[in-house]
Image (cartoon, rainbow, N blue to C red):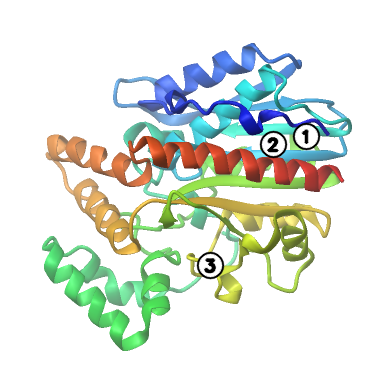
Amino acid sequence: MTVRFAHTAIHTEVFPPDYASARQAWLRCVTTLPYPPEIRAYPCAGAGPGGESLLTDSVWIGDSQAANVVVVIAGTHGVEGFAGSAVQIDLLRLLTEFELIVPERTAWLLVHALTPWGYAWSRRCDQDGVDLNRNAVDFSAPLPETPEYRLLRPVLFTADQDERSRALRAFGETRGRVALEKAVSGGQYLDPAGPFYGGKRPAHGRLVCEDLIRQYSLAERRLAVVDLHTGLGAYGYGEIICDHAPDSAGAALARQWYGDSVTLPLAGTSSSVPKLGLLDYLWHAVMGDSGCYITLEFGTYSTDQLFDVLLRDHQLWAQSGNEAERDAHAGRMRRHFCPADPAWREMVLFRARQVVVQALRGVSA
């Protein structure tokens, strides 16, 4: 396998200013690929701030019969798509310049803007308030009960930040920090206006993934899935989070492919606590024992800051007639999930190259 980009310059201008620019840049890169690409577009309900159409795009690069596939997903959480787009555009440039080669019997599948409405509006969720990364549950069965969220809900919608912080801190001191983070962010199915809401039916991004799995017969191939996220963990570091069970074949593959930097929420070694309805679980179901799904999570600021900026976002969107304040807060969302710091952006692109090549080597072995 040929990889030559160790000394290739990293250009942070690949980070887009908005969803529409990101999609245009992504499509331009796809059309210049030296490999015949197969492009699919999935329209999403709603429109962007400028009335623009919203779509999730995918591209298959390589042999249609490839036994191995590297899947790179951007924008599972809409506003986190700014960094996800940059990573995918960087990879597409490397492929175009033959700095990164598609091995025989291996193909790439890039999925861009999996939650396009949230990307366009600088929110993590979709137009119905659904967090796609809590949506992979069986909606034909009783939904998970989340009594801790119900208990905390009045606190989460307290407008006074100091009062809210004191109440959350008291909950954490009484029940423990992990219990606090699970109560707030572990997933809830009660409150469409609230954070980390899993919805009542499959969301757009889940339906896209299910269609791609069918269209490309992915259950019959060996998969390495890398889902790009931002906002949690150490500043600028790309944590490899594996939500496979610690004693599973998927976790063993993660350690084999990515080494000792792999963290597992279910083993208590990750910056992430265990969560309900993760998109991972949808892919786990089709992988069997031959594939591995990881979240590549690039840290920005503290978890407390994450909760503050996200809770304020949900408070504002639960109200009406405050468009100017929403617009101002959208800038704060972008700064939290995609800092403008050139050093942070360089670290993201460097680490993403490293981890994607690990995935490529692992699945192709």
Q: Which residue is mark 2?
A: 212
Q: Quadrant of the N terminus?
A: top right
Q: Nearer the viewer, mark 1 or mark 3?
A: 3
Residue 317 x/y as whole percent = 23, 46
Quarter assignment of residue 353 = top right
Residue 237 x/y as whole percent = 48, 52
The answer to whether residue 113 shows anywhere in this view is no
- Residue 322 vs residue 190: left or right? left
Residue ranking furthest to the front:
7
Quarter assignment of residue 123 = top left
Question: How many C-alpha atoms fall within 10 Å of the one at disc 1: few (<14), some, or many (≥20)?
Answer: some
Q: Which residue is mark 3?
A: 270
Along the line of sight, the residue nearer the viewer: 318 or 300? 300
Quarter assignment of residue 77 = top left
Residue at the image position 75 percent from the left and 54 percent from the top: 257
Residue 15 x/y as whole percent = 43, 28
Secondary element at image label 3? loop
- Amino acid at the residue labelled 2: Leu
- Amino acid at the residue labelled 1: Tyr
State yes or no: discs 1 and 2 in contact (Cβ < 8 Å). Answer: yes
Secondary element at image label 2? helix
Residue at the image position 48 percent from the left and 25 percent from the top: 11
Question: How many C-alpha atoms fall within 10 Å of the one at disc 3: few (<14), some, or many (≥20)?
Answer: some
- Residue 186 vs residue 96: left or right? left
